[in-house]
């Protein structure tokens, strides 16, 4: 069962470079624009989302949530979570918060048999009165414990894909991992696949036959899971990322197009947010 009392969406793919972090940051930006209290959870030891959300050298990270000293009784994540979550950087809205990552998080993949994969779920539950929706940026590691913990905590899984062999492969592998989580008797039977979102899509003038081939393959193999929304590869997205600022603050037509795409994905994934808007 997922975290109760708060929306929780995991962005997953078992291949890197498919736009997972950019989708996560985009969803955080548009959810914050709606006035929601938003939490970004960075489970990638590279800390890309942490950096994009404007966090430098955090005092504590999600590694502190997961770490268990085998020589001592485990500390309840409920007591640790409030000390890990921090407000995003100054260019982000005040209603955006971060549970940051650092490189030491990679060591947690070596832990085993101590219930580590359930600690994130409990930590996010502890923050349910402070946050309306969490977006979890899961690392691109096939079947890893950090990915497993994200899927145990989440109510929805969103899978980004590029129009490429890696994109297709990342989707295929992610769906297998998800099936192990939400199968009858699995750790999170309530977990739903919100869909597959095509990301870093070349502009029409740059679209080639190989891209169209993989687009067709995604549609044929994954059917209704493939969302109609395309997230185009506009340079303004990288400009916002480099500035460590939300895409919603960027000027111009292309930024507005991206904001609209992220909003469409958000409302598809969490339709009650659109209904609440009226």
Image (tube, rainbow, N blue to C red):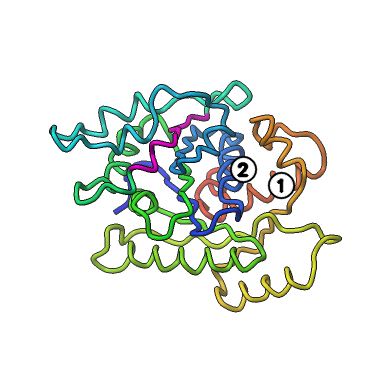
Q: Quadrant of residue 247?
A: top right
In the displayed structure, would residue 216 be above or below residue 276?
below
Return the residue nearer the eye: 125 or 64: 64
Asked whether, in this view, residue 57 is left or right of residue 69, the answer is right
Query: Is residue 146 shown in magenta?
Result: no
Query: Could you say where residue 146 lies in the image, as x and y percent from the top left?
Result: 37, 49
Q: Residue at 61% of width from left, 34% of height from top?
A: 33
The magenta-colored residue range is 96-107
Asked whether, in this view, residue 30 is left or right of residue 137, the answer is right
Q: Residue at 42% of width from left, 46% of height from top?
A: 8
- Crowding at dot 1, Cα within 10 Å, few <14 / some 14-19 / many 20+, comes out as many
Return the residue nearer the eye: 90 or 277: 90
Q: Residue at 34% of width from left, 38% of height from top?
A: 124
Q: Are marks 2 and 1 in contact (CB under 8 Å)?
A: yes
Sequence-first disc among 2 and 1: 2
Q: Residue at 23% of width from left, 66% of height from top?
A: 185
For disc 2, the marked residue is: 26
For disc 1, the marked residue is: 258
Count the marks: how many? 2
């Amino acid at each position: 069962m997922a975290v109760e009392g708060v929306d929780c969406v995991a962005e997953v793919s078992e291949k890197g470079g498919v736009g997972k972090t950019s989708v996560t940051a985009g969803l955080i930006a548009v959810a914050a624009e709606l006035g929601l209290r938003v939490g970004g959870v960075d489970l990638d030891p590279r800390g890309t989302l942490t950096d994009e959300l404007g966090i430098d050298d955090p005092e504590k990270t999600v590694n502190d949530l997961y770490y268990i000293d085998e020589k001592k009784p485990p500390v309840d994540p409920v007591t640790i979570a409030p000390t890990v979550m921090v407000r995003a950087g100054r260019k982000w809205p005040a209603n955006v918060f971060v549970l940051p990552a650092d490189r030491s998080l990679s060591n947690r993949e070596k832990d085993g048999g101590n219930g580590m994969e359930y600690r994130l779920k409990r930590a996010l539950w502890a923050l349910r009165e402070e946050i309306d929706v969490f977006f979890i940026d899961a690392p691109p590691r096939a079947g890893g414990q950090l990915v497993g913990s994200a899927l145990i905590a989440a109510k929805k899984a969103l899978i980004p894909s590029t129009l490429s062999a890696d994109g297709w492969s990342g989707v295929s592998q992610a769906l297998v991992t998800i099936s192990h989580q939400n199968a009858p008797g699995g750790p999170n039977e309530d977990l739903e696949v919100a869909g597959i979102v095509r990301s870093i899509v070349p502009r029409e003038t740059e679209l080639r036959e190989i891209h169209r081939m993989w687009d067709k393959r995604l549609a044929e193999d994954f059917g209704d899971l493939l969302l109609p929304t395309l997230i185009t590869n506009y340079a303004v997205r990288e400009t916002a990322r480099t500035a460590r600022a939300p895409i919603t603050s960027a000027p111009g037509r292309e930024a507005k197009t991206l904001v609209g795409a992220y909003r469409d994905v958000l409302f598809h994934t969490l339709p009650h947010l659109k209904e609440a808007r009226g």
